[in-house]
């Protein structure tokens, strides 16, 4: 379970804070939006089929990156049909064998 905005997730060698997750409206792939912890800029990363492996590591395919929250929100809504504010990390479950879902 992704608990809240303060939960740090290590993915691809960097620390991220989960922002939202959902499923694409076309092919039903899961999409997780992660905020990369970096200073002074921010970066939002879209990961398709974001899963947690048995060893505790996360994997998935990065499909998009943006530094602008409004661009991230627009892209998330375009992919999933949901507003990013409605897809909070508290509602996301990461399955060990499956995918992130609401």
Image: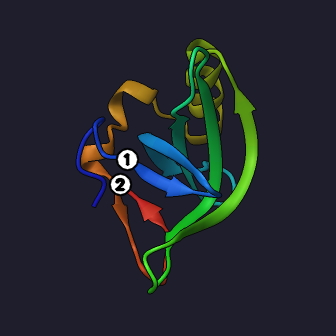
User: Between residues 48 and 55, which one lies in front from this camera angle?
Assistant: 55
Residue 82 horizontal/vertical position (percent): 47, 33
For this view, does 51 lie left or right of residue 71?
Answer: left
The crowding category of the residue bearing disc 2, from other C-alpha atoms within 10 Å (few below 14, some 14 to 19, many at least 20), is some
For this view, does 29 lie left or right of residue 1?
Answer: right
Residue at image x 41%, y 60%? Answer: 101
Residue 62 horizontal/vertical position (percent): 72, 51
User: Between residues 76 and 9, which one lies in front from this camera angle?
Assistant: 9
For this view, does 97 lie left or right of residue 42?
Answer: left
Q: Which disc number belongs to residue 8? A: 1
Q: Which disc number belongs to residue 23? A: none
User: Between residues 23 and 71, which one lies in front from this camera angle?
Assistant: 71
Residue at image x 37%, y 47%? Answer: 8
Specify which label sits upstream in the sequence, 2 or 1: 1
User: Between residues 85 and 54, which one lies in front from this camera angle?
Assistant: 54
In the orientation shown, which residue stands out farthest toward the front? 39
Residue at image x 61%, y 21%? Answer: 74
């Amino acid at each position: 379970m992704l608990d809240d905005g303060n939960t740090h997730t290590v993915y691809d060698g960097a620390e991220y804070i989960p922002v939202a997750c959902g499923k694409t409206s076309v092919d039903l792939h899961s999409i997780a939006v992660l905020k990369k912890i970096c200073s002074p800029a921010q970066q939002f990363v879209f990961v398709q089929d974001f899963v947690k492996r048995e060893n505790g590591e996360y994997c998935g395919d990065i499909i998009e990156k943006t530094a602008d929250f409004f661009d991230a929100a627009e892209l998330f809504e375009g992919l999933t049909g949901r507003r990013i504010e409605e897809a909070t990390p508290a509602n996301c479950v990461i399955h060990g064998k499956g995918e992130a879902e609401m």
